[in-house]
Amino acid sequence: MYRLLIIKRVAILALVLSCLATTALAQNWPSFRGSNASGVADKAKLPTHWNVEKSQNIVWSTPIPGLSHSSPIIWGNQVFLITAISESATVFKAKDRGIGLADDNVKHTWRIYSLDKGTGKILWEQTAYEGVPRAKRHVKATQANSTPVTDGKYVVALFGSEGLNCYDLKGKLLWKKDLGVLNPGLWDDPTSSWGHASSPVIYRDLVIVQADGHAQSFIAAFNLRDGKQRWRVERGEITSWSTPTLLEANGRTELIANGGKFIRGYDPLTGKELWRFSDNDTQVKMQAPLVAHGLIFVTGGYPPGRPMYAFKPGAAGDISLKPGQETNEFIAWSSPKGSPYTPTPIIYGDYLYTCADHGVLSAYNARTGERIYQERLPTSFSASPVAADGKLYLASEDGEVLVVKAGPKFEILATNSMGKPLMATPAISDGILILRSEDKIYGIAERRPADTSGSSGRN
Amino acid sequence: MKSKRARARTHASGAKDRRMNLQLFPILVLVGAVYLLANTFTVAASDPGKGDWPMWGGAPDRNMISNMKGLPVSWDVKSKKNVKWVAQLGSQTYGNVVVSGGIVFVGTNNEGLRDPKITGDKGIVMAFRESDGEFLWQMVHDKLAAGRVNDWPYQGVASSPLVEGDRLYYVSNRAELMCLDIQGFRDKENDGQVTDEKLTGEFNGDVVWRFDMIEEVGSLPHNLANSSPVSYGDLIFVSTSNGQDESHVNVPSPKAPAIIAVNKKTGKLVWEDNSVEDRILHGQWCSPTVGTIGGVVQVVHGQGDGWVRGYEATTGKKLWEFDTNPKDSVWPKTRNEIISTPVIYEDRVYLANGQDPEHGEGVGHMYCIDGTKRGDITKTGMVWHYDKIRRSISTPAIKDGIVYQPDFSGFLHALDAKTGQVYWTHDLFAAVWGSPILIDGKLYLGDEDGDVVILQQGKVKKVLGEMNMGSSVYSTPVPANGVLYISNRNQLYALADTLQTTSASAK
């Protein structure tokens, strides 16, 4: 009995310690959608309401030149982000659904910035490339769509067809790598180039890049230390914009890559394909796979195919569904519909939330795929939802952040206007929501009533 | 009147087919095709409806209604409950099913590879036997060499055919108005003026004549020619789909007509109209409608400048025109094109405007227009204007003084046909490409999520059910001879109420 109690106490202590560890980790938001693309930064208190005009809960705002849908990332007290600055007026259509290309045939400057998380002050900035873009882009996209990634020692930024750059946290360029022209576009038209968007991820001492375009379709891993290529696999895929996700389970790590033809698991150390799943009906994939509840969630696709799948880890070989099948040994549940086109869903607590481009928010039981609710929001979305403090934060193309209560009952808690379209997925760290609007980065946090000094980050 | 008789004739031949099926009874039971059998009974015994569905909208007025009774209100494509048969189509299906003469016709693409020797991207029209869904023949159209600008990849044939007697009319992806023999080459005869078909096997379509709108009237369709034909007397009416080029600025063929009338026996041009000239905002994807308005048989057509025009059917004389956009609207943000088919109902024209689905969502407008007026009737002919609608590409169903009109954002609006006053709206949560159909007091409507919702007809909203079809439904459900046809992107389902049929046949 006594022994048992001790064991129990040790267990509780371990639990507390692990929670602390999680909290410490949660302060960083090291990649697209934070830690392993989860989009969740729990244990942080975040404001529900803010007001830009009245400076309510706006801790700082910092203008950033150029145009970029890439998200900010956060490590310690530093925020990192990239941009592309055109020397002439830039065409950008936030709500466009067509196939039109922007004419970017003038000199651009690609830059990386580091800001102070508490004040928004620019700590350093570096020019990565200058010149006429090597690839065209969609009128809705930018010349800097990929979100950087960091492990606290290296910051790696992918400037699309202009290349992959690695910096230290002080902004010193360590290496750069030309990956060739990366030109995903309209999937069946090789002349169509809408701009690369998949973000790099870090695994151990490697940075891994997925690039499925017309000219090239590969996943490659490079040493963080020196940029040397460790492995590269040709994928033979059609265009995609999806960022890969890592899953550690049962002593094995899988790199999960979405794709228009196959969803695949790779060994991140060698690039060896572990499993594949045929998903031929979807044309294009934009969404990052998610891992939660011991499952891998892969969504995405352009109509008519917009399926959602919950895979079990540890698969091998071809795990495709046979006609008429909905599940098999490695598929916990699947649905032929429900996935948005652009925003990656989010799993927060027991629920999988999808926020579709056309403003329909749905909640599902993540373990079973059963739909809990479906509600219409009065706006449209490209950015992915993020979550913290029992709330979902949905940044819209109309320039609003809708705050929705997490859980099985739908409730809009607030609609906060930022004035300009919000295309980048927000970042969260230490109770601060970092929001990228068209021309500014905002730090938003609950401020004590006494703290009424104005925005301090402008420089 | 003549077409009514033709319809009655085709209905009768359909009944003959069904009788023949009865003789197959023992074999069918042996192979377990009980559904099929049970249905065959019902149709023969209890079908009080209009029988065939020989064109887009069922009738020239394009009103999406039917009096057919006994169609299913629930089914399950997984368990095959109330599924009479399923036919595999291509990978994308934008055309709508028509049923006539015991044959079901539908436009699709070639990804279904019905003929393994014919590979690559093509426009396809497939013909299936109505009784059991057996594939009969297909017509194959190569893609236009110019590519996406005139003939978007993998969209197949998007025109919904018109059947009159033993002739099938539709517009191919190559912008040809086609006239085919409904039997294809199964009758071992090469009918009509065209006898140089390359494919003449028993599973191939037999061309009677073709009218190439690119060659003959200079049309350069924007992205795809898609018009669904309609007829009056000896004339077939179609939109040319003439539009802008890839620049989305120029109209390269400003002298090409927007609408043409072709003699259905000879395939020769009878009249054309080009009121729109170079003012085409984008493309022209609206199909024409025929009906009697104020005692005059008119063809009504929405055109590329966002105006809808009424013509005297026999002569092509323009009677009236109406701008469906507010004068201060600006393309493409607030000014719209017309993709929905107009509906003629009790001397009025009902129409919603919208834009290419690739343009996404936005503001829309719906109108009730008095087509008895003449000239520019934008002011004088406007009975009502409803602006609480989003962009729409759907055609309304109108019955008992209520208009049911969906929009592309996924809202269905029920409006008073006389005043435009809204009774209710219903949110489908997914984009609506197809149109509602009102059958025996129940409204069926599909969406991009593949859900088909069934609502009660009337001033009070009541949802009766919702079924998923396994993939996006871009089409409109079609009732014919006691069967409900619904195509999703790659399959055609023939649905029939097997339980009800069994009890009916027991009587």
Image (spheres, coloured by chain):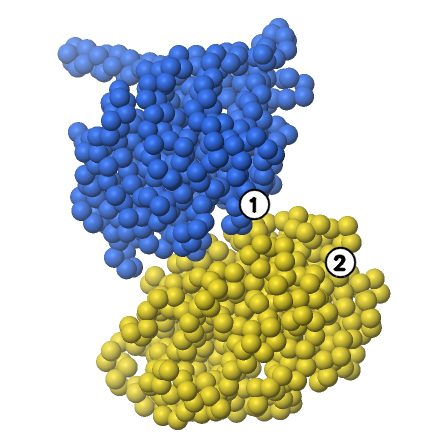
Q: Chain of mark 1?
A: A
Give the quarter of the figure containing the C terminus of chain A.
Answer: top right
The chain coloured blue is A
Residue drawn at 29 percent across, 31 percent down: A208
Q: Chain of mark 2?
A: B
Mark 1 vs mark 2: in front: 1
Rendered position, A117 above or below B211: above
Residue drawn at 31 percent across, 44 percent down: A217
Which label was assigned to residue B385? 2
As helix, strand or loop, the secondary structure at mark 2 comes to strand
Give the quarter of the figure containing the N terminus of chain A.
Answer: top left
Residue at the outermost top position: A450
Seen from the viewer's position, the closer of residues A41 and A18 is A41
**Would residue A314 be found to the left or right of residue B37 on screen?**
left
Which label was assigned to residue A273? none
Determine which residue is flagged by label 1.
Answer: A96
- The location of residue A410, given as percent across then percent down, is 52, 36
Rendered position, A353 above or below B141: above
- The location of residue B366, given as percent across then percent down, is 70, 59
- The location of residue A373, given as percent across then percent down, is 48, 42
User: Are the residues flagged by discs 1 and 2 from a single subunit?
Assistant: no
Rendered position, A221 above or below B281: above
User: Would residue A316 be visible to someone looking at this image?
Assistant: yes
Hue used for the chain lettered B? yellow
Q: Amino acid at mark 2?
A: His
At label 1, counting other C-alpha atoms closer than 10 Å, the crowd grade (few under 14, some 14-19, many 20 or more) is: some
Q: Quadrant of residue B20?
A: bottom left
